[in-house]
Amino acid sequence: LIELDRAHLIHPVSSYRGHEALGVRVLKSAKGATVTEASGRQLVDGFAGLWCVNAGYGHDSIVEAAARQMRELPYATAYFNLGSEPAIRLASELAERAPGNLNHVYFTLGGSDAVDSTIRFIRYYWNARGEPKRDQFISMEQGYHGSSVVGAGLTALPAFHAGFGIPFEWQHKIPSPYPYRNPVGEDGNAIIAASLAALKAKIEEIGPERVAAFYAEPIQGSGGVIVPPKGWIKAIRELCREYGILFIADEVITGFGRTGPLFACTDEDIVPDFMTTAKGLTSGYVPMGAVFMADHVYDVIADGAGNSAVGHGYTYSAHPVSAAVALEVLRLYEDGLLENGIKAGARLMAGLEGLSDHPLVGEVRGRGMLAAIELVVDKQKKTPLPASAMPARRVFDRAWDNGLIIRAFANGVLGYAPPLCCTDSDIDAIIERTRRTLDQTLD
Ligand code: PMP
C-alpha cells in the first residue's frame, strides 16, 4: 500500500517541506475515539480526523441511515426545484436549531465550497439591493476559510496563496485578536478595542460604501486554535451592523458541538447574516457542508434573482445520502453526545492546563473539545519554535509513536479536537501521551 500510495495517490499539499519522503501511515478501522493502523496498532484520535468526526467512529445507526437512503433513493439533484425528503427535513431541522433568523440552508460538499457559495450569495445580495459597488471583502490574519482559489484569498495562510495572485485585490485582512501574541497585551478589553479600531480603519480605508462583508471564525482553527476574548465576536458583529456590512461566522470547525453547544454563535449570543458549516454536520462519514442564510438576506436575493444572471450549484448539492447521515448525526448529538462533549471538554482543558508548567508549554487555550498548546523555546520571552516546520512535525511523529494523533501546526502549536464521544480514559490517554511526547521532545 505504501508503494502504491507513493506512486499514485496525490495527498493534499501539506506545509511540511519534504513530506513526500515521510511516507504514508495507513489506517484500517476505527471505533469511538480509537483508530487502528493497518499493522493493528491502536491510537487515540485526538483530532477527530481533521476536526470532523465529532460523533466518533463506528456508529452503526449512521451506517444504517446511509444504507437505507442508498437503497431507497441514492441521488436526487437539487436543481430544477427537485427535492428529496432527507434534504428537506435536514434543512428544516437545522433552521430550527440555528441562531436567530438563519432560516434558510444551502447544502454544499464541504467547507471550502460553503465559503465560496457565500461569496456568490453576497454579491447577488448587493446587486439585488442596487449596490453592485460593494465588492470588497475583509477577513483576518491567521484565518482559514478554505482552499479553493477564491476562498483561499480569504484564508490568511501564505502557503495557500503562492503563485495564484491571491489574495485578490478585493480581499483584505485585519490582524487576528490573538491574545497570547497581541501587541496590546493579553487584556480582553484592550484586544477588543484594538480589533474594533483595526476593522474600522480598514473599512474607512477601503470606503464604507465599497465593503460587502466581513468573515470571522468564532475560534480560529487552522491558524493555531486562537481563542479571542469573550465578547470580541459580539462587538465585531455589532460594528458590521453599524456599517451595514454583512457578517459571516465561519463555523466549519466550531459548529456541531466542538465548543459545547451546537453552534459557537449561540455560545457568543450573536446572530450572523450567514453561517458556514461542514465537518461535524455529517461527522465526516460522508462529505457535506451547509450555508445558513438569514431571512433578511434570503428575501433580498430571492426577490432580486430574476433581475440578473444568477447561477450557482453543485451536482451533489443537498445529496440525499449525506442528508440522511446528517439527520442521524444530529439525533446522536442531541441524544447525549453534546452533553458528553461538554463533560469531556472540561476534562481535556483541565488535563492540558496541568501541562502548563512544562518548560516547552507557552500557553494552553481552548473551549470545549477544541484546544491547543503553544510550544515555545523560552516561556518568559514567548520565543516561538524555529520557523521551519520540522520541529512541529517531529512532535507529531513522536505523539504518533506514543499512540496519539494530534495536529502539529508549523508555528509550534499543538491542536486538539477529539471526538465528542471520548470517555474519561480516552481523555486521560490524550493528556498522558502528550506529557510523554513533550518530555521526549525536551531530550
Ligand atoms: N472554513 C474553516 C473555518 C475551516 O476550518 C475549513 C477546513 N479546515 C474550511 C472552511 C474548508 O473546509 P473543507 O476542507 O471542508 O473544504
Image (spheres, rainbow, N blue to C red):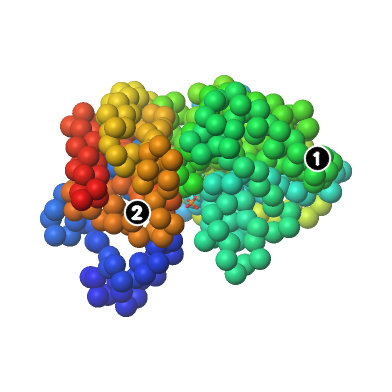
Q: Position of residue 358 (x, y in %)?
A: 27, 37
* Residue type at numbered disc 2: Ala
* Residue type at numbered disc 1: Glu
SS of the residue under disc 1: helix
Whether 427 is drawn above or below 37: the answer is: above
SS of the residue under disc 2: helix
The answer to the question of whether label 2 and label 1 lie on touching residues, with beta carbons closer than 8 A, is no
In terms of image quadrants, where is residue 195? top right
- Image point (51%, 39%), residue name: 181
Q: Position of residue 440 (x, y in %)?
A: 20, 49
Q: Is residue 81 left or right of residue 329?
A: right
Spatial CA distance of label 2 from label 1 is 39 Å
Q: Is residue 282 left or right of residue 198?
A: left
Mark 2 or mark 1: whose residue is earlier in sequence: 1
How crowded is the residue under tag 1: few (<14 C-alpha within 10 Å), some, or many (20+)?
Answer: few
How crowded is the residue under tag 2: few (<14 C-alpha within 10 Å), some, or many (20+)?
Answer: many
Q: Which residue is mark 2?
A: 392
- Image point (29%, 67%), residue name: 22
In terms of image quadrants, where is residue 434? top left
Q: Which residue is mark 1?
A: 204
Q: Quadrant of the N terminus?
A: bottom left
Q: Which of the pair 359/8 is nearer the observer? A: 359
